[in-house]
Image (cartoon, rainbow, N blue to C red):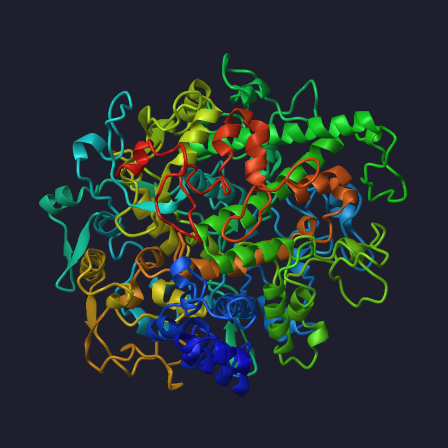
């Protein structure tokens, strides 16, 4: 190494010396033993210098994560100057990426260790342990058993414990029960949302805890600060031609000259924006479908701060803001708001749950429940083909369209279907709420994909009818099921498994890697999924180093160790077992696989809940409030004309509910795919919410306005559900706190840059909306972190006692992460949102049996396993050339579109990631420049 350093040149000499010093001293971050000792995403100056040179050192003192400043973690400008070390493991680029991966994995393990708070009654056992087992290694809970009143109670009864078996474990159940065969209730419909933050920090407006009262005083309430005022001042998109936008409703006839300005994300498209709505419909829903008469409430537009004092809005101020005092919305349902009990362990007192709890009315699994159903009522809306019950019903609705149109479109609801009146005229699917053109697109695409799998499976069965399909019935595991023996109902459920796994794969390695567009996240997300099947050396090495440092005397039995020691990948974890192995591990090609369907422990062997039953936490819901991604107008193009020409500017609001179905059938899937694929999504930042969502007309509302401001409603729902405010939210997730609004300003920007001046103006607006107060250093405000000198954090946040300081503690979490102007390269989201994803994206894979130990031919069929692994039938297909230094397979969603919309083959030829704007040139190493690829030079989207 010393010899290489001497040859590397003086321009990197100081950085290399820093590395030598770090290596010699063993200066490396360890997994924290207590919450206040957490990593916080910050490294010592010498380590920063080693991994990112002077640039990383310059930014080391900011509150933001350090790893995005390391070598090779951005675009080509982040690559180190050429040296002899560059091609080695010790080279700046290699160690920058490896250092970033190490820190990301360290964060993930600490998040799993410190941020699991279950509301369903298991938390006390998590803290105290049970039956001589430590809480974090518990894998079963009495609270996750079916109650005697459950219709499947008799099916799971056993002498010692409940165990799911037979048909209940063969495929995904409609209600989500029996994914974990020992915890049948987990992840099913109507389970309580969990939390990722200490219970005492939730519902800060209630002042439930002394530190909460110290943190916020009397400044918070459900409508305080006023949510509509926050929305109008901090969320509204400014318009250069308001007459051409009409508050997001566009112009009559949707002419091309309509115009609604919005800040555009450089490398994320509108398909990506609608994809996440498609996903969240599968994951969580707070609202009951047929609630009792709801309670209605006002939603603000009544007061604002003036000189740090609350004043009522005048009629003139209301008109100037554009808000509406007469808006009303239903109160969000609460499962339990009785005072929570507490318990003492090790001289410390704990709450058993949050002050209020809420229920998830869909399954928490990645099971495509928005397509297939999540309870009996929703399943009645799913229409199967009466001529072939293995298929979903698709009907021809367009003549003279593209090749894909021959496979048909989803039918609309019938008069007798169990639906709300406002869903009339929409396509028939399980979760039809908030219907839009984007949801119509993805539902139709994956209905076609379901049927495409059935057709290809049938072709395979016709070729080799007597061959072993790989499927087995758990009730009779020794009986071979031949291809010709597979029934239509079995094939339907196999197709659901395959489509669900495809969707999970698309989200993990395609949507997320475009959302977080840089090399560490490309490697990390692919390793998260593929680790058992592909080599990602740097990720595996980072994992092994962290596992080595767990400093756990019983590491072999530690749940973190068991989950991570086998390798980086989660998908397929535990679907092989080998004699002599103490836990489920990597595929070993030279050893006999002894995994058997007759063993309950094999069926369940790959899952890991880390001591806390899986469900989504409320904090996960809040970071998916991504409305700024949507434009007000869709730039409509036609696939069979010049794709560079925008034919119309269609208001998104004109594609809601039944209008979406009408628009889809008139214009066709291919043209909508082209339109949304080429158009850039909005940037997730302040003053960039769609105007139509601030002025959304909803006739079913019981108010004189029959309108609602969705941006303001996002704030209200977070407050109703007890989301901690922004600064404590960051502390709870192991991130550095901010000490004032000026910390939001990107420290990389020159003092005189126009972008910096814009950020400074937005900071002034934050100060105007949330105000300031005289601080009191005698008031401790958190126990989640300590100051650098290990003293408690107090109300003054490092400022002198009695100073007039910003009310940074009061900022709504959504406002805070939208204000994070300093982000890792290529990130469409903030670092605060990102850490929530790190934790929960991993957990929903780790906990799902069908994505871990039951990803096997016995459940998916041999044909289905190949389909998921290769992104379709046959061998894996590879893209031509290299993208960002990688030879990549044709992505799963691209393969889906090529199967279901073959008329787009030419347009998709140069597309590497379907969520990158289709006409954008990806350029060199993770470029986010807005430049046209070959053939798109005439696209008017590049003229501005």
Give how far across and how far down residue 141 sits, in percent: 67, 62
Could you tell whether 378 is left or right of 661 in the image? right
Q: In the image, is residue 895 above or below residue 577?
A: above
Give how far across and how far down residue 406 sits, in percent: 57, 18
The residue that appears at 17% across and 35% down in the rendered structure is: 241
Q: Nearer the viewer, residue 898 or 315?
A: 898
Displayed quadrant of residue 613? bottom right
Count of picture labels: 0
Q: Nearer the viewer, residue 719 or 738?
A: 738
Displayed quadrant of residue 13? bottom left
Q: Is residue 156 visible?
A: yes
Q: Is residue 122 visible?
A: no
Q: In the image, is residue 904 above or below residue 877?
A: above
Query: In the picture, which quadrant includes the C terminus?
Result: top left
- Which residue is farthest front? 7
Could you tell whether 745 is left or right of 724 in the image? left
Could you tell whether 4 is left or right of 299 in the image? right
Q: Nearer the viewer, residue 332 or 483?
A: 483
- Which residue is farthest right? 478
The residue that appears at 70% across and 31% down in the rendered structure is: 492
Give how far across and how far down residue 808 sits, in percent: 28, 67
Query: In the picture, which quadrant includes the N terminus?
Result: bottom right
Give how far across and how far down residue 231 sits, in percent: 26, 49
Q: In the image, is residue 375 above or below residue 132?
A: above
The residue that appears at 64% across and 25% down in the rendered structure is: 384
- Which residue is farthest top? 399
């Amino acid at each position: 190494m010393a010899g290489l350093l001497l040859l590397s040149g003086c321009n990197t000499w100081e950085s290399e010396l820093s590395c030598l010093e770090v290596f010699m001293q063993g200066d490396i971050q360890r997994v924290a033993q207590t919450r206040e000792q957490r990593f916080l995403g910050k490294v010592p100056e010498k380590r920063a210098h080693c991994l990112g040179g002077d640039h990383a050192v310059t930014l080391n003192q900011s509150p933001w994560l350090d790893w995005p400043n390391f070598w090779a973690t951005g675009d080509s400008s982040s690559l180190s100057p050429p040296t002899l070390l560059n091609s080695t493991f010790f080279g700046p680029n290699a160690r920058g990426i490896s250092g970033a991966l190490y820190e990301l994995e360290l964060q993930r393990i600490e998040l799993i260790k410190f941020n699991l708070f279950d509301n369903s009654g298991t938390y006390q056992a998590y803290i105290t342990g049970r039956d001589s087992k430590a809480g974090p290694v518990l894998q079963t809970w009495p609270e996750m058993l079916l109650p005697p009143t459950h219709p499947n109670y008799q099916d799971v009864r056993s002498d010692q414990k409940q165990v799911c078996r037979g048909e209940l474990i063969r495929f995904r159940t409609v209600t989500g029960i029996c994914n974990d065969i020992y915890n049948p209730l987990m992840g099913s419909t109507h389970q309580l949302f969990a939390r990722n933050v200490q219970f005492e920090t939730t519902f800060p407006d209630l002042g439930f805890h002394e530190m909460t009262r110290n943190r916020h005083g009397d400044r918070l309430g459900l409508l305080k600060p006023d949510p509509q005022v926050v929305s109008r001042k901090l969320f509204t998109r400014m318009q250069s031609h308001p007459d051409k936008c009409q508050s997001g409703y566009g112009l009559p006839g949707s002419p091309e000259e309509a115009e609604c300005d919005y800040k555009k994300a450089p490398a994320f498209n509108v398909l990506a924006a609608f994809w996440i709505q498609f996903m969240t419909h599968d994951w969580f829903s707070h609202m009951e479908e047929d609630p009792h008469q709801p309670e209605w409430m006002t939603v603000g537009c009544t007061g604002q701060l003036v000189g740090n004092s609350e004043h009522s809005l005048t009629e003139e101020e209301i008109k100037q803001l554009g808000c509406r005092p007469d808006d009303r919305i239903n109160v969000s349902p609460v499962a339990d708001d009785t005072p929570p009990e507490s318990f003492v362990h090790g001289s410390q007192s704990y709450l058993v749950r949050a002050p209020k709890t809420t229920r998830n009315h869909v399954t928490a699994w990645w099971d495509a429940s928005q397509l297939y159903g999540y309870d009996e009522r929703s399943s009645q809306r799913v229409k199967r083909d009466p001529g072939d019950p293995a298929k979903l019903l698709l009907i021809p609705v367009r003549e003279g369209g593209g090749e894909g149109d021959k496979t048909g479109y989803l039918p609309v609801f019938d008069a007798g279907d169990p639906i709300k009146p406002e869903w009339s005229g929409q396509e028939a699917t399980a979760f039809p709420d908030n219907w839009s053109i984007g949801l119509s697109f993805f539902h139709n695409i994956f209905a076609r994909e379901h049927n495409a799998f059935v057709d290809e499976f049938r072709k395979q069965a016709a070729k080799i009818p007597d061959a072993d399909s790989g499927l087995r019935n758990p009730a009779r595991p020794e009986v071979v099921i031949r291809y010709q023996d597979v029934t239509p109902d079995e094939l339907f459920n196999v197709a659901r498994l395959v489509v669900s796994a495809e969707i999970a794969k698309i989200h993990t390695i395609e949507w997320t890697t475009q959302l977080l567009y840089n090399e560490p996240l490309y490697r990390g997300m692919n390793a998260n999924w593929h680790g058992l099947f592909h080599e990602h050396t740097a990720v595996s090495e980072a994992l092994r180093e962290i596992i080595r440092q767990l400093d756990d005397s019983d590491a072999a039995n530690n749940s973190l160790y068991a989950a991570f020691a086998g390798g980086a990948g989660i998908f397929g974890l535990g679907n092989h077992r080998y004699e002599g192995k103490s836990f489920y591990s990597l595929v070993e090609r030279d050893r006999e696989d002894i995994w058997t369907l007759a063993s309950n422990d094999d069926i369940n062997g790959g899952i890991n809940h880390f001591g806390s039953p899986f469900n989504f936490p409320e904090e996960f819901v809040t970071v998916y409030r991504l409305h700024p991604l949507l434009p007000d107008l869709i730039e409509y193009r036609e696939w069979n004309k010049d794709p560079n020409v925008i034919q119309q500017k269609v208001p998104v609001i004109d594609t809601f509910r039944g209008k979406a179905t009408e628009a889809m059938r008139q214009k066709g899937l291919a043209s909508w795919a082209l339109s949304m694929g080429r158009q850039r999504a909005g940037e997730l930042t302040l003053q960039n919410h769609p105007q139509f969502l601030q002025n959304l007309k909803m006739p079913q509302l019981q108010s004189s306005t029959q309108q609602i401001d969705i941006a303001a409603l996002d704030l209200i729902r977070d407050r109703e559900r007890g989301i901690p405010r922004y600064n404590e939210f960051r502390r709870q997730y192991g991130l550095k706190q901010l000490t004032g609004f000026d910390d939001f300003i990107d420290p990389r920007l020159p003092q005189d840059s126009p972008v910096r001046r814009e950020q400074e103006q937005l900071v002034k607006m934050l100060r105007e909306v949330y105000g300031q107060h005289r601080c009191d250093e005698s008031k401790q405000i958190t126990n989640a972190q300590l100051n650098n000198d290990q003293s408690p954090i107090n109300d003054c946040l490092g400022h002198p006692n009695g100073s007039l300081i910003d009310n940074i503690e009061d900022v709504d979490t959504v406002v805070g992460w939208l204000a994070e102007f300093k982000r890792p390269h290529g990130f469409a989201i903030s670092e605060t949102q990102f850490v929530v994803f790190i934790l929960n994206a991993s957990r929903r894979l780790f906990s799902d049996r069908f994505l871990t130990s039951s990803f096997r031919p016995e459940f998916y069929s041999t044909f289905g396993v190949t389909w998921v692994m290769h992104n379709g039938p046959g061998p894996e297909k590879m893209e031509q050339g290299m993208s960002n230094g990688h030879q990549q397979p044709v992505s799963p969603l691209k393969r889906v579109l090529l199967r279901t919309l073959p008329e787009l083959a030419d347009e998709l030829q140069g597309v590497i990631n379907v969520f990158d704007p289709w006409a954008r040139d990806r350029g060199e190493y993770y470029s986010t420049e807005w430049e046209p690829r070959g053939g798109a030079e005439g696209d008017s989207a590049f003229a501005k």
